[in-house]
Image (spheres, rainbow, N blue to C red):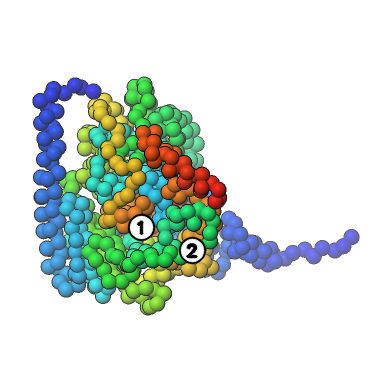
Amino acid sequence: MIPLSSADTATEDTSAEDAPAEESGPSDEMREALLAEIAGLLGDSLVESHIVPGKQLYLRVTPESWKETHRVLRDEMGFKFFEFLSAIDWMPSPFGKSEDASADAGIPVTKVEDPGEIEQGFAGGETRFQVFTRVVDISHDTPGKSVGVIVKVDVPDPHEDPEPVLETLLSIYPGTNWHEREIHEMFGIGFTGHPYLEKLYLPTDFEGNPLRKDFPLLARHVKPWPGIVDVEPMPDDADESDDDSGAAAEGGDDA
Amino acid sequence: MTAVTEPTEQDQLAYVAAKAADSRVNVELETDDGMTLNIGPQHPATHGTLRIVAKLDGEQVLWAEPIMGYMHRGYEKLVEVRTYPQVTTLINRIDWLGSFANEVPFILACEELMEIEAPPRAQYIRTVLHEMGRISHLIMGVGDMGVQIGALTPMFYAFRDREYLLNQIEAATGGRFHPNFDRIGGVKDDLPAGWIAETTRIMKTMTAFCDQMDDLLMGNEIFEQRTRGIGVIPPELAQLYGLSGANLRASGIDWDLRRDSDSPMAWKHADFKVITHTDGDSFARTWCRLQEIRESAKIVTQLLDDLPSGPIMAKVPRIIKVPAGEAYVATENPLGEMGYYVVSKGDLGPFRVKIRTASFSNVSIVPWILRGVYVPDIITILGSLYFILGDIDR
């Protein structure tokens, strides 16, 4: 390594300290301008939005405008690069994180007393399920200028309300084909207009939608698992090491 | 002697058809409206257990549909019951040739949520290992492309030279394919003594490999005839299908996350070219990969030359809890863009992780691109798209 003079290092340090503040300002503005432009085009169909400064722009649109939103983003805003389409089940798992001792002791599928409330993430939401896509404008080749947007949409629970509310995006982004099939088998969420919404990964006779939070991961419950018990104490904290070894011994007895 | 009835031709056909339906063996079925050719799941040309069913009219493909799931491991579900440090062990196995590169975007996403940044030395080490993973991956891609057209020599040279890289990766991380070396806040260990000099020397071998391949493969008349003008992907369509990596750049789109994103990794300190090609055919894709090996070797040499000193771990709590929030971080992995959409609720483990893999999107264009091609070109097109089954099935 070339030794730097102390003066150089000092200037570098200050610039490194100033840089995040300076960068987050403009990129913030950039995303806000982008959001204003998108909001103007989408009008009422944009329900909510959220900006993580310098990182990401989240939009939430109405289910009716799902396809139209993507058409606007692709044709009028230039977001031509389709990154992914996925879904999320916001319900806290009724089986917990399966990290606690009961799972390790091999007690079969126990429901957690109080899994907690459904709490949606950025850009809010009203339903348990959300579908989201990310599309990017890759026409700018300056670092940080090419931005992507994450578009979310509320979807009712497909087990209670099996009628699909979303239109397929196949005619906008042909790459959504397999993504939509995956979401259909993993969550049960359907897409109207998709010509071949068959299982993508799972066997044809598989029952259930594995990525739903109420689908138990049985492998995790039938086999003891070390979980979060840290059996290797850190050398510098003597107090905690006693606790840890005790916990490890108990875990061993249970197993 | 007991008389055994000779099976009629119809009986034989029915038997073969039943076998095909049952055990999905590699057979050809002839019907009135063309022939169905079943490629895989165990065909050597499909890089694993991808199965493609193609409907043929003579030598021409009427339609083709990949059938996946033979290697689906459900990582998106499995990570929900693991703690953040445990996740890297799983995700190492997604794109098994890319090794270290799989861990990087996930760790970066966690760091973004925790609002910490690894110290510069750790970022340099990460970038160097990431690029070495890319070289060892793309070497196989180029060698494998030779195999697809019947040239076995490039593959053996690729195996030979990849060994040098794997030895170096093993020396630094302890693992050849699954390093599990990246940590939230830095990397596990510092580089061993003498590693830098040896790696710099090996990068020269890699450049020599590229020269050799330029002569052996790219300048080979048979290779050009089998790949030029075959499987052309138009740039607009490549974007709409979400193609990334060399597959996108071979269609003339100048897009590389190493340069075009403000990633905290050390790529911004290196001087390298983003390789593009305008043809968009099988040849262009393979050519881009080969040239990318050169650029990666350049990056590794440069970064090792000005590797900063200092700590390799930021200050992170002993038990890692990631604050609630959402983050999507993608990096330019050997096969293309790989990203993790991490949703945290402030627990010890992620609430949901969406894994965006490059191969999944790259292969999703297969039904489109195989329509109308001839049977021998199926193999070269698949080889030039270059995918890893674990990266498709996750």
* Image x and y of residue B214, in percent: 37, 33
Determine which of the numbered discs, if any, sits on residue B107 in the image: none
Q: Quadrant of residue B210?
A: top left
Q: CA distance from mark 2 to mark 1?
A: 19 Å
Depth check: A236 or B325 in front?
A236
Q: Residue at x 26, y 50 (%)?
A: B113
- Label 2: chain letter: A
Depth check: B41 or B107 in front?
B107
Tell me the residue that label 2 is attached to. Answer: A110
Q: Nearer the viewer, mark 2 or mark 1?
A: 2
* Image x and y of residue B22, in percent: 61, 63
Q: Residue at x 66, y 66 (%)?
A: B14
Relative side of A37 to B158, left or right: left
- Label 1: chain letter: B
Tell me the residue that label 1 is attached to. Answer: B351
Quadrant of image for the N terminus of chain B? bottom right
Amino acid found under the numbered disc labelled 2: Thr
Depth check: A248 or B94 in front?
A248
In the image, residue A70 sits, relative to residue A11, either above or below, namely below
Amino acid found under the numbered disc labelled 1: Phe
Relative side of B257 to B43, left or right: left
